[in-house]
Image: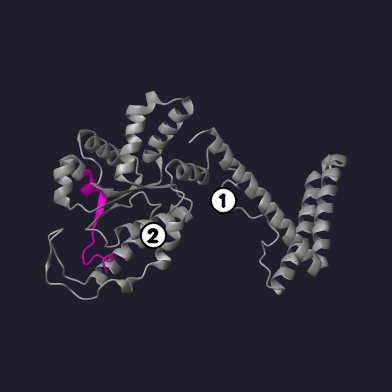
């Protein structure tokens, strides 16, 4: 990502603010047309505010009395306005400016000068080419989760992928997993909320439920990065090995920001762990991410086709130990829904 991309994102914020102001003006015209009394009340409130400033300058000794009297008059008019709205089933905030992000008020930055999470998320989407994830999350979320697609019979066979003997049906298992995911989202803000490790073969719903969690937390304003283990390793390699070969400083800055975001985002979802090339660098960096985020109380979800023994064999005892210590291990089993 270069400076032009950042500027384009900031222009989007400016455009959104202008659009919201335009929509507010249209709502005002609509209300004033149907309810002239509302327009008159707003004009009275404006006049009181203008007179207040003048009176305070003219009579500084009576400042408190003047301010209190003005407040009482304004509150009386606002209550009168609210009553008209309520009697006509109009939302009380109908004539207030709406924001896409109430935290930064669509300015991209907080009052402290720090980037708002909504701005960080837009940068992440551009940087990691995640623009298509919005379409995916519209299709795959808790509201579209359908428990009935999972078989309701109990298989007496051993699941050869994970050596798991089924004691309940795939549907019952998914109902339990779905409930755990809902609890994870609802308790996300708690520091003692354990991470999740999804294990099981392909086509069992691991990615779908990762998408459900991602959408819910994105909608709540959290900073979420959702990438495959393969892409995460590429980001790490860019930062550690190729940054000195970048053509300009912008590339270096973005490379570092990509790297830092893996450790600082509110939730990191590592999908398809085990599909990346596994070597000493991979093992070390996966451990570093998991361990650093655990120490910083940052949440992580890992989805993998590997079982616990595979994780031990591929990544070693210390990585497995960190995962087991900090994760609720959730096993997916049953028939591949994609084949079905």
Q: Residues within 10 Å of mark 2 (few under 14, many from 20)?
A: many
| Residue indicated by mark 1 | 101
In front: 331, or 274?
Answer: 274
Residue drawn at 42 percent across, 43 percent down = 128
Residue drawn at 38 percent across, 35 percent down = 259
Q: Is residue 165 above or below residue 309?
A: below
The reply to whether residue 243 is visible in this rendering is yes
Quarter-wise, where is residue 110 in the image? top right
In front: 294, or 311?
Answer: 311
Q: Is residue 63 above or below residue 218?
A: above
In the rendering, at what x and y percent does residue 306 appear?
20, 52
210 to the left or right of 100? left
| Label 2 element class | helix
In the rendering, at what x and y percent does residue 38 appear?
79, 64
In the rendering, at what x and y percent does residue 5 appear?
53, 38
| Residue indicated by mark 2 | 212
Query: What is the number of the mark on residue 250?
Result: none
Quarter-wise, where is residue 255 in the image? top left
Q: Nearer the viewer, mark 2 or mark 1?
A: 2
Residue drawn at 37 percent across, 67 percent down = 145
Residue 126 magenta-drawn?
A: no
The reply to whether residue 112 is visible in this rendering is no
Quarter-wise, where is residue 252 in the image? top left
Q: Earlier in the sequence, mark 2 or mark 1?
A: 1
Q: CA distance from mark 2 to mark 1?
A: 21 Å
| Label 1 element class | loop
176 to the left or right of 48? left
Residue furthest top in the image: 244
Q: Which quadrant: the C terminus?
A: bottom left
Residue drawn at 25 percent across, 39 percent down = 287
In the rendering, at what x and y percent does residue 314 appear?
17, 43
Q: Which residues are magenta?
A: 322-340
């Amino acid at each position: 990502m270069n400076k032009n991309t950042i500027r384009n994102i900031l222009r989007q914020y400016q455009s959104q603010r202008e659009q919201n102001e335009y929509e507010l003006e249209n709502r005002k015209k609509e209300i004033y047309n149907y309810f002239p009394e509302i327009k008159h009340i707003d004009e009275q409130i404006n006049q009181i505010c203008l007179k207040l400033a003048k009176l305070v300058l003219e009579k500084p000794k009576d400042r408190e009395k003047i301010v209190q009297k003005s407040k009482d008059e304004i509150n009386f008019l606002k209550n009168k306005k609210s009553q008209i709205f309520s009697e006509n089933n109009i939302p009380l905030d109908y004539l207030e400016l709406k924001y896409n992000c109430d935290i930064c008020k669509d300015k991209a930055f907080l009052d402290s000068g720090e980037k708002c999470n909504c701005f960080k998320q837009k940068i992440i989407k551009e940087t990691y080419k995640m623009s298509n994830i919005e379409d995916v999350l519209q299709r795959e979320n808790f509201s579209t989760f359908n428990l009935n697609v999972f078989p309701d019979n109990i298989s007496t066979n051993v699941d050869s992928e994970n050596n798991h003997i089924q004691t309940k049906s795939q549907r019952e298992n998914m109902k339990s997993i779905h409930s755990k995911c809902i609890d994870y989202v609802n308790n996300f803000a708690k520091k003692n909320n354990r991470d999740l490790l999804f294990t099981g073969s392909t086509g069992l719903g691991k990615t779908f439920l990762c998408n459900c969690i991602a959408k819910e937390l994105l909608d709540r304003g959290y900073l979420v990065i959702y990438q495959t283990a393969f892409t995460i390793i590429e980001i790490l390699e860019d930062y550690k090995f190729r940054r000195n070969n970048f053509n300009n400083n912008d590339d270096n800055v973005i490379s570092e920001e990509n790297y830092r975001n893996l450790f600082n985002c509110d939730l990191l979802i590592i999908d398809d762990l085990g599909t990346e090339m596994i070597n000493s660098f991979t093992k070390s960096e996966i451990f570093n991410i998991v361990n650093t985020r655990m120490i910083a109380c940052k949440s992580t979800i890992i989805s993998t086709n590997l079982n616990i023994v595979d994780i031990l064999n591929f990544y070693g005892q210390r990585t497995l130990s960190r995962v087991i210590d900090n994760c609720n291990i959730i096993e997916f089993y049953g028939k591949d829904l994609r084949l079905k």
